[in-house]
Image (cartoon, grey):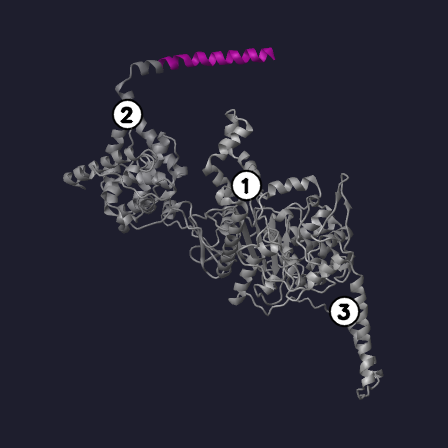
Amino acid sequence: MKRLITQFFEFCAGRLAELRPVAAAALRRVRRPTRRGVALTCAALPALLFLYVLILIPFTPSIGDIRKAKVEQPAQILSADGKLLAEFKPSNREWVKLADISPHVVDALIATEDHRFYQHFGLDWRRTASAALHTFSGDRQGGSTITQQLARNLYPDEIGRAPTLTRKLKEAITAFKIEALYTKSEILETYLNTVPFLYNAYGIEMAARTYFDKSAAELNVLESATLAGMLKGNSYYNPVLNPERAVQRRNIVLAQMVKYGKLTPAAYETLKRRPLRIDFERQTEPPGPAPHFAQQLRKWLAAWADRNDYNIYSDGLVVRTTIDSRLQAMATQAVVWQGNQLQGIANSAWGARAGCANGRDLLQVFLRETPDYRAAKDSGLTDSEALKRLSSDRNLVQTVCESKTRVQADFLALDPRNGQIKAWVGSRDFSQDPFDHVQQARRQPGSTFKPFVYAAAFEGGAKPADTFVDKPIEIPLAGGEIWRPSDEDEPSGRAISLRDGLAYSRNRITAQLMETVGPAKVARLARAMGVRDSELNPVPSLALGTSPVTLKEMVSAYGTIANLGGYVEPVMVTRIEDRNGEVLAEFAPVPPRQELPADTARTLVDVMRDVVSRGTGSSIRSRFGVRGDVAGKTGTTQGYADGWFILIHPQLVAGAWVGFNDSRVTLRSDYWGQGAHSALPIVGDFFQRAQRSRLVDVRARFATEQEPGRFAELSGKIRAWFEHLFASPVRPEAPSASRDATRRAPAASVASVASAASTASTASTASTAAIELQPLPQPPLIAPAPASAPQPASEHVDGQAPAGGVPASAPTPTPDDITPADAGSAANSAANSTANDPVNAPASTGTSP
């Protein structure tokens, strides 16, 4: 090995000795260059530069790309009935023709940025050479023409941003291409429509509206000079942030206009003394009729476009969605209307206008969570001193109070037959509440989760007439805890059927049913039916809805019920077309997947009908007059933090949630806090409008009639034949007084038995029965009952009994509350505290089109 290394070094030394005379001769030629050598060197430099330019040409935007940039169109989002819902623009820009731009703008632009614009072909050699000399001498200057600036604005990624020779060469090459394709007027039009002006204003039209509240055609000389002056440095010469610099720069532009004959010296002397007058207003894109839906659709469409090599901002895609603009408008009106009603109640309950005067203790908790409190603590203040300082800041207190006590609401409606989403309202006001509560907020569903428990029971063979005794329940949990579900009233000791248990939302009955079925089976069934993104904790308290879910999941799962057990994933898009109307993709309805046996679903629908006919959701018919075959379920969580209601119809399923972003804040009303009085009116108002507009057919009915099997059908025919064969004829008899007396005797005996039973009953049971038999008054639309005034028992229930009362054998309707012990485990409690915060709530997984 040593020998080989020695031979290698000897070889290298020999080669270096041979190259030494050659290197010495080359060094002598450099020190004493000949004329021929100098000439060759001078000729080589341009040749190398030309070769480098040729190499760069393939790496600059092509002619096709430039033409495409000129005609770029944002994706248009259309409703199912052809109405424009949104346009996906990369920036806030509106293209205007050059003829619709003030001539003063063009004059100011050319005089300041490129006064030889009409003489060159993309590159001003004299200006470029002058800029290079100044840069080499230490005074850096820009020499880009308007065409070069346009190339940089259109293709910042392809050309680059670094101040290098390569970037300048790419910019020049692209400018030559643009000049070869565009006329001078087209170049000016494109430049003025693409140049940025801060505040998300792109193009001269948006700049004119932002800074002067007028169109580009109406700009005068001073305004045109101000905007043209901003092009040298948007932030540095910003008339809002730096008005003095903006005036100086404006006057320089005016002087340039005088220099090149676009303004008279006399006019300049007059104009340069005038103050800077701006009328600033940020330009925001209108949210459109379905902003939260469009927000979710943008994410899905961007992924689709990336997979299929399209650009949602420039390729002119036309996306046809499932939204019905008429139903969307009705849903928005219902959410805004009910939200405003409840906001007044919340303001009164919390004293919001007086800085949460009615909730001082919780306000201090909120103040401790602000950055101002942390800053005060970091400065060395104690807790009491920091709170005292923050409490004295009225603006801070008012801001915190109003944000925490702002009522939130959302709504979703879909067609259960094909999963098409028809209406989507993510909050009361998108501009104030852009967070999407439909798909992103996870909240406890309360008693709206109970149908899954009953579905699992019916699937296992239970019947609606099966009963459980209304008695105290104690269910042991892992870790030695005991769960004691309760209702508003005391246990009656009566047998209550499953039908009445769901209709009147009895917690103790549902808990016993959950014990029979098992939490794991209920969780599996709920996931199969549509609750597929949120985690369901398989504990007994899941029966009362302790695992947070989204409204989209719940409405989707109720769609499975309405579709008689067939699950269809919610869809947003039916077809995507290009700008010429050619279909790029179609999304046909997916066949439903049977996740719940059809017979079980028929039984569940039939039982849920009683919720709206005589149970907790009866005001759907009595107050809102919703007709047709409908069923549903109300839901209310512990402390009235969440109110839910979901209504199913053969053609449409609609659900609403009402609450606050922070679950520690509630409406503080055992009446308005219930889902039957907070969320139900949203769905009721929506369905009422939809039926009046005939967008929902009131004649449609669920196919809940059980089809008899062949054996049962044959047995029935045989039984009927035997009855007909052996029936004895009935002879008419004349009525007599003795026979009438005999006929009345059983009735008298029944009355005496009923009287005896009534006398033997306890006082509490008798009083409850008396309340149940009384007609219930309709609730007020706006003002709640005073907290100090006694209220009838019916106003403390989740819904109302129909006028005329309920049968004495039926249980008293109770609110769908869950007690603190209902959390089932410490994990559930922790999940609830974060799921109720839209900032910390985890985003839902991606949705199908």
For the N terminus, give its image quadrant: top right
Is 15 in the magenta? yes
Q: Could you tell me the amino acid type at mark 1?
A: Val
> Where's residue 24, x and y in %?
37, 12
Dot 2 or dot 1: first in sequence order is 2
Foreground label between 2 and 1: 1
Residue situated in front as seen by the camera: 632 or 487 = 487
Magenta segment range? Answer: 1-25
Please give the label number shown on residue 139.
Answer: 2
- Residue linked to disc 1: 839
SS majority, magenta: helix
Residue receiving disc 3: 709
Tag 2: residue type? Asp
User: Where in the figure is residue 73, as x and y percent of width and height?
Assistant: 40, 51
- Could you classify mark 3 by the number of other residues whose Cα lies within 10 Å: few (under 14), some (14-19), or many (20 or more)? few
- Residue 402 lies, in percent from the top left, at 50, 43
